[in-house]
Structures are given as C-alpha cells and as structure tokens.
Amino acid sequence: MQPNNLTALDFNDIKSSIKSYLRTRNEFSDYDFEGSALSYLIDTLAYNTYYTAFNANMAMNEAFLPSATVRDNIVNIAKLLNYVPRSIVASKACLKLNVQTTQTNGSYPSSVTLKKGAVATGGNFVWNIMADTTVEVNTTTGAAEFDNLAVSEGSIMNYEYLVNTFQSQTYKIPTQDADVGTLNVTVKPNESSTTSDVYNLVDTVTNLTANTRVFFLSEGEDMRYEVRFGDDSVGRKVKDGEVINLEYLVTSGSEANEVTDFSYTGDLIDSLGISYNVADVKLHVKERSQLGTTPESVESIKYMAPRYYSSQYRAVTAQDYAVITKKIYSNADSVIAYGGDSLNPPIYGKVYIAVKTKTGSSLNDATKKTIAADLRSYAMASIDPVVIDPDELFVYPKVFALYDTGVTSNTSAIKSNIQSAVGNWATQTQINNFNSTFRNQQFQKAITLSDRAITDVSVQTSLLKYIKPQTNQTNTYCISTGSSLYNSAPSNTGAASSTSSVCKKEPVILSGNFRTADRPGIDQQFEDDGFGNLRTFYNTGNKKVYTNENAGSINYDTGEICVGPINIVGAGNNIPTSTNLNLTDAVTGVGSVIDPSLLPADLQLPTLFIPSNSSTIPASTPGTIINVVNPEVTVAPTGTTPPPTVPLNSLTPTVFNQSPTLVEVSTITNTGSLTSSCF
Amino acid sequence: MALKRLTSADLASNKSRSFKDIGMAFGRNPFTNDVSIVKNENSIKQALRNLVMTSPGEIPFNKNVGCQVMQLLFEPLDGFTADTIKDEIINTINQYEKRVQLRSVVVVPYGENSKLAVTIVYQVVGIPIVEEVKFVLQRPE
C-alpha cells in the first residue's frame, strides 16, 4: 500500500495514518496497545513527521509578509521593500521659560543659553532638549524668554564604535527603546580628534555620490536599529580607525504622555559665563506632553510596507503627489493634486497640488516653495510641481423654516435642532473639503427632519468669494464662480426703446467695502449692471453715486468676474488711517495717501453673487473647496409667506469682512492636534 | 484527514490473531537477519513492563499514559510508598492494558538502594492460563 494522503499535519492524524498502514500488513499486530514496543516506535515516527511538517509549515509561513508572525522575520521581509518600521517615539511637551539675568559691571548679558540635555522633570520622567538653545536678553530689564521650547522625554545616550575594517561590523543602537527620530550620527577621524562630520539619514540611493556623508537605517534583530554607511560608491565608506558616535534618546514612549506638571532642572549660562539656578527661572507649561508612541506593531508593518513600496518613492500619477505631499508635510489635512492639462486653458508640464491645512490657514510662500522643492526630488523630469492654496468658494444659505404652532411654540428649540441637523448633515456629506458638492435638497431635507414641528423649509442661497488685493498696486483681479450667474431680467436686452432709455438690470454681484487710491476717503463697492460690466459706487446715505461705469467685466455664463484695473488701498475694516490721508474733497473722498508704507496689508474683499442654479453647487475645479457658512436661521409660524429664494437686492457682503464661521464638520478619525505653535 | 479505508480484504481471515511485537532489545534474528520479534504471552509481558517503566508525559501528545513509579522511587522507602507504587501499577495496567486481567501485584522492598521487587500475576483475557512477570524497580544511578 502506498500512502495516499500527505496532508496530515496533526500528530494524531499522522499516527492514525501509520497505524492504518500497519493494519494492512501482517508482520505486527500490537500497534493498538499503548504498552507495546511497536506503539512506542509509531509514536516516535509520528512525532518526527509532525516535527518536520510543523517546521516546513512555519518556515514557509514566515517567508511571506502576510503570514509571518515573528517580528524579526516581518521586519526582514519589509526590509526588501525598503521599509523602515517606526521606532518608539518620545513624548513631547511645550514649555516657556522666563529667566531673570543678573547684571555684571552694571550691564546685563547679551544672551543666555540653555544647554542640551535635561531641562525639566515631570511625571517621574526627565525632559530634554536635543541642542543648545540661545535667546537674547532684554538689555533694559535683563529678562530672557525661551518660548515654545519643545522638550522630549527620555535620556540622551551616546554610544561609540571604533571602525575596524578587518572584521565585519554592524553598528547597532544597543537598545530597543531608542527614538530613532532623534538619532544623530557623527564620525571622527580618530579617537583623539575633537572635530567630527555629521552624517545624514537617507532613504534612497539617488543623488548620492562617493563622498556624500550619509547613513542608512534599518531595524535589526530584537528591535535594535542598525546604522549602515555607504561603500564609497553610493555614500562615503567609514575608514579604519574612525570613531562613530551615535547619539539618541532612550524613551518611555507613550507612557510619558499627558504629563502636565513640570519643574525646571536645566543648565543655563549667559554670554558672560554666569550660571543661573532654579530660583532665577520661571517655568510655564504651554502644552501637556503628547505625541509619544510605542514602536510600530507587526500588524502595522505588515499593512504599511507594501503600500509604501507601491508609491516607489516617486511621483508619477497625480495621486502619488497627493500621497507624498501628505508624507512630507504633516500639517496637511487634505491634499489634492491634478495635472495642469485639466485646466481651462490647459497648462502643460505642471502638476498643481492644493493643500488644505489642519489649522485652516493658507500656506505662506516659503512653505509652498519648500513643499514644491521637496516634491521635485520625487517628480519625473520636466514635471514642475506647483503648490497652491485651495480655491475656496463659500455657500451662504439663509434658512427660513415654518413650523406648526399646534405642535410646539418653542422656536429656540427648533432653531437649535436645525443647527445640530446642519452639523450632522455637514459631517455626513464631508462638505468643506475637496471634491464636495453642495446639494440644496439634501440640506433642506436634513432641516425638515430635524424637528417634527417643521412643516416647510425655504433656503435662500448666495455664493461668496474673496478677492485678495495687493495694497497700493494697480491690478485686475479675476475670480471665477465656476457656474453661471443669475439673470435678473431676461427680457431686458439692453436696447433703448422709444419710450425710455436703457434700464440696467438688478445687480447679481455685490462686493464689500473697499478704498481706492484715488478716493481713499470713502468706502466704495462694486456691482454689475446686468450687461457684462462692473460699476463702482459709493453711498452718500440716500443715494448711490457711481464712480466708474466700466470698472470690470463679467461673463454670466462662465461666472468669470474681473475687476480692474483698480488700485485698492483698503478693504472692509482694514482701511487707511485718516491721518495718513490728504483729502481734497471729504464728500467724494477724493484725495491721496501720504505714506503708502503705512497702508494695511493682507486685504480681503468679499464678493457676494447669486448663482443661476442654487440647488446643486459643485466644485468647478479639482482644487476647489466648497465651504458652507453657518446658516442664518429664521423661524416663523405656518402661514407666513417665506421670502424669495433669490436674494435680489438683499445681498449683504459687508458681514463677510471677517472670514465667516463655517458649519462644523466633525472629523471621523482623530487626526491629532496640530494647532500648537510648538509641534 | 482522510485515511486509507480498510476493506474486508485487508482484514482477511489469514491475518494472525496472535499478538506480535518488536523485541524491545531490537536484537537480530540470526536466521532471518531481521529484527527479533516477541509473540503472544511474551509480547504482553514486554508491554506490561514497558507501561510500568514509562513515566507520564514521555509519550508525545498523550501525557496520561505511564506510571508514576519512577517518581515514587525517590520517596522514603517505607510501606506507604510501596503501597502507593502498587496502586499505581494496578491502575496503569487496568487502564492501558486491556489484554490482561490482573490477579495480584506484589511490591516488596529489599536491599539498601531503594530497590523494589515487583511481581505481577495476571491472566490473559480469553486464555485460562495465569502468567507472572517479575522485575526489579530501582532508582536510576
């Protein structure tokens, strides 16, 4: 008989299989009795087979990332994908230290330095800074302030290796509790040398020459990270007799989070060489300790390693740009990238990356340039990454709800129910983000269902965009609503009839207040005439006085609005001070600015307009964010006539001189707090 | 797992009804040059001795098989220990050797080095002959 089944992996199955074979033979018969020598032999054979089968199974399982269970094996497979598991990360806290320096020979020192190392204790942990920090001293009061001092929990360790090229050396960080984010690698030419070279961590071998001082990091056995150097082809090789110094923080990770009480223990010395003790320092805790984490789990490594590998450390598709931007700029809440060829008119050779930050503020030029420069190393040749601010379009809904007086008379309860329903609607639709669409019907339905007393809901919708003028520069500013604008008088063709002259249409665009360089003394606004022209005017109190009938143009079909050429010197409440103006006519505001350098900067001019279709407002470009302004809610008993849904003659742009409060979209996952100036 | 199915041919009448086991000494049969075998009453004797000499846990994945006598040999050698050893032997044989019916077990201490003379008297089930197996239990040196 031949064994016909080789799938048995269990000891008892294997034993049964051997017994069933012996049953077909007549040499022996005692295999069924536990005490027989044959039974002992069968046990040994089955055990041996079981052992081999287990080994083979285990070895094969451990050879593949999805089935491996031993951390060292998982890390080794991830190493092939160039993935470095995240180490333990030290908890960080934000402190402010106020130091009162003392006078020497009648004068205060020019600066005071906080030495690297332990700065504070708190929660049975030690808190360090990783480099000396120097601040200036106020020469009159002698006070110095270390603001936004980020301290990390742990103890700073140094470990040295003497390079010996005659033996195979690995340079390990000799602990599993090292935060490799704090790792600082320096190499000295020999043991007695006092100068050293700093080596930098790299992920890939691109851009490395034979002399680049870099090191590679990988996780080795038992979670001890290994530092590797180049081979004189990619990266400089360490030479015999050189001394490698590894400096790192050994930390308790997440255990040190949530510490709120700290006491100062640091080492302060001023520019005159005088040390200060604890009594001279006042410590103020700005942020409790946070962001400490445990080492990356095996499940996380198994999940992340193939995904990191799939982007291949290079950006080819637009999605790659978005993923890499998120990796290199941690304050990015949401990123969208699209090729310039999808724009109208197309711009070839550029990829646009719109970044919505976690803090909500726009990126400054320096940050944009840094992100673009960082992205360029991932980008394909000839593709130019351009980081832009999202194009923000605000939807301003005014809600009129009619309620059944027979059900309730508590209008404030209805209002608060409506507000919470709007909040839930916003969270579910994830509005205020890229690729979102404002759907009026869903919005109205959410409000209708918010309270059983509500019988009818009417929503008046207008759109808001900000023009960001450059102070005291003559420019033409264009904004695009992305959709067509409302036609307030379709039958008015603009032709003069025999009985009357040309009538303008009701305006569908109205801007907020602004000041121009030629009329700095009076607030002006602009509106449209219904025939493709913008008109600027000021209000004397009882009449509008038009100052320019051709202040800009509008395309009602595409929603392109261009205002200018115009020289704006103030907008909203951000206006020139009256002492800086030389007015020739106080009524018309005509005059000039005395000192242009004193003019306000960072102007924003709200522009309200009425869309032709207010039931669906989509994002017109991939980089557009539809923001919904917290609605103004009016509640009235049933029977009241609701106001018109088109807000003709009731546009109120001046309420948006300040950026509006948006409906709150609760985050579905905890993205962490990055509002602090420290982290 | 699927095992090979037994057919009536496998269990044909020409199969021996006797007991046949490998000799524990794994000796060589000088005539056949094959491993020596023990049969019938000798195989049962060998099985009884094996059971008593096996400590629980020695057999993989079946930790209950065996007899605690080896551990008990390290207890003070008195009447109580001898009695416990006797009970152990009786229990083990009754549980794991279904071919015999025990008649008596005699455990007699002798000598100085905790030696025990064990005599097991039994009847092979279905055969009206009483057999006896004797061996000495001693601490491993």
Image (cartoon, rainbow, N blue to C red):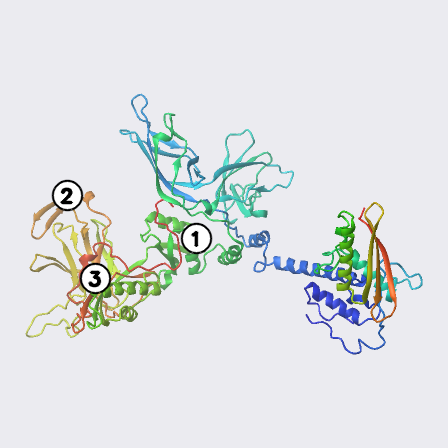
Rendered residue at 35%/65% (across/down): A428
> Where does the image place residue A516, in percent across and percent down from the top left?
16, 52
Amino acid type of the residue that numbered disc 3 sits on in the rendered structure: Leu
Label 3 crowd bin: few (<14), some (14–19), many (20+), radius 10 Å: many
Q: What chain does mark 3 sit on?
A: A
Tell me if A255 is positioned left or right of A540 in this view.
right
Amino acid type of the residue that numbered disc 1 sits on in the rendered structure: Lys
The residue furthest top is A105
Q: Earlier in the sequence, mark 3 or mark 1?
A: 1
Tell me if A319 is positioned left or right of A536 in this view.
right
Amino acid type of the residue that numbered disc 2 sits on in the rendered structure: Ile
Quadrant that contains the N terminus of chain A: bottom right
Residue where numbered disc 1 is placed = A327
Q: Which mark is residue A594?
A: 2
- Evaluate whether label 2 is on the same chain as label 1: yes
The residue furthest right is B31
> Where does the image place residue A355, in percent across and percent down from the top left?
36, 55
Report the front residue among A11 and A675: A11
| Circle 1 SS class | helix
